[in-house]
Amino acid sequence: MRVLVAPDCYGDSLTAVEAAAAIAAGWTVARPADTLVLAPQSDGGPGFVDVLAERLGGLQTATVRGPLDRDVTAHWVLHQDTAYIECAQACGLALLGGPPTVRTALDATSFGVGQLVDAALTAGAQKVVVGLGGSSCTDGGLGLVAALGGLTPACQRLAGVEVIVASDVEHPLLGPMGAAAVFGPQKGADPATVELLEQRLTAWARELESVAGRDVAVEPGAGAAGGLGAALLALGGRRESGATVIAEHTGLAADLAAADLVITGEGRFDDQSLHGKVISALVGQAGGTPVLVLAGQVTLDPSALADAGIEAAYSITDHAGSVELAMSDAANQLTGLATGVAAELGNNGPTRYR
């Protein structure tokens, strides 16, 4: 049997590449005769570059400003004339050096993301794909624009360059569903800080509108990555699903067509997983091929699984016996879970799920 192993990342516990390797290692123990194809996925957030580098090569390294004052080493991919950039490489929550606070929520910047875009343009990229997700900043992309010399110079530098905003977040920039209100608290902002961030973004939105000739703040995805989406849209970018970008640029359709069974997963498999995330994208393209989910936690009702076209979902937490062990020993626990699922399948093929 040909098995496609295509997980997303598992929060901060496992990258998509690590998760795919762990699943494959466990599956092979119980079903060594199966052919496994590893195709780690991403929706644009952390792991976006790792996934692309695994399939495309072309990994580049740059020293850029992190979300605070310290420089960080960031990776990006250059494949032919297309650059792939992950905002979390330059302004991710993991780069704060500790838990997010009110101060980091106010001070974190997207300047380093702009430096990565600058590096891509300097390298001759004619297309720049920016994966959004996992950011620590809520600056509306002001830092990115500053790194490119300001709004007018940034527009000039990107003229004739195709810019793709790779994100599955549909939130606008402002308001109760905007970047500050929805994502600010996750980045350390208390209610007063959320209000201040909203005021900053409102003023910045007017500047973006003056350059774009339209109110980009209301467009879906403008609030992604602390408003980085709004800046990139104003600079001529267009939004595409991050999961779809990965699928198209890594040849997922061909992998799915050849698979007898698909195994995917993520940190928490819940209702949001069925709306624009990696798992929903895989199911939508699987064409009837059975799909299994191996997730850190599973909170969906079994009836929702069937309605979504998913054969079965398994929890690492249930396998490990606790959330703590599932997170602290994620790779080994995922490997063990995969072995158990494969053993349950026994000598049967994918028809077991029919």
Image (cartoon, rainbow, N blue to C red):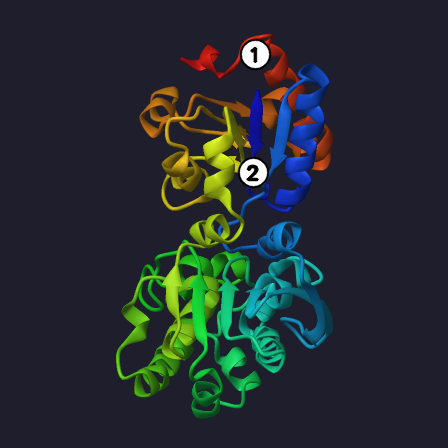
Amino acid under disc 1? Leu
Residue 345, labelled with which disc?
1
Amino acid under disc 2? Pro
Q: In this rendering, would 116 be left or right of 256?
A: right
**Mark 2 or mark 1: which comes first in sequence?**
2
Residue at image coords 63%, 68%: 90
Residue at image coords 67%, 17%: 33
Q: Position of residue 10 (x, y in %)?
A: 59, 41
Helix, strand or loop under label 2: loop
Give the quarter of the image for residue 224. bottom left
Q: In the rendered picture of this protein, how many numbered marks are placed on residues?
A: 2
Please tell me how crowded label 2 is: few (under 14), some (14-19), or many (20+) other residues with Cα within 10 Å: many
Q: Which quarter of the rendering shows the C terminus? A: top left
Give the quarter of the image for residue 176. bottom left
Q: Which residue is mark 2?
A: 7
Q: Position of residue 71 (x, y in %)?
A: 73, 74
From the viewer's side, name the closer residue of 89 and 296.
89
From the viewer's side, name the closer residue of 193 and 342.
342
Residue 196 seen in the current view: no
Residue at the farthest top position: 347
Give the quarter of the image for residue 40. top right
Q: Position of residue 273 (x, y in %)?
A: 42, 39
Q: Please, is residue 284 above or below residue 288 in the view? A: below
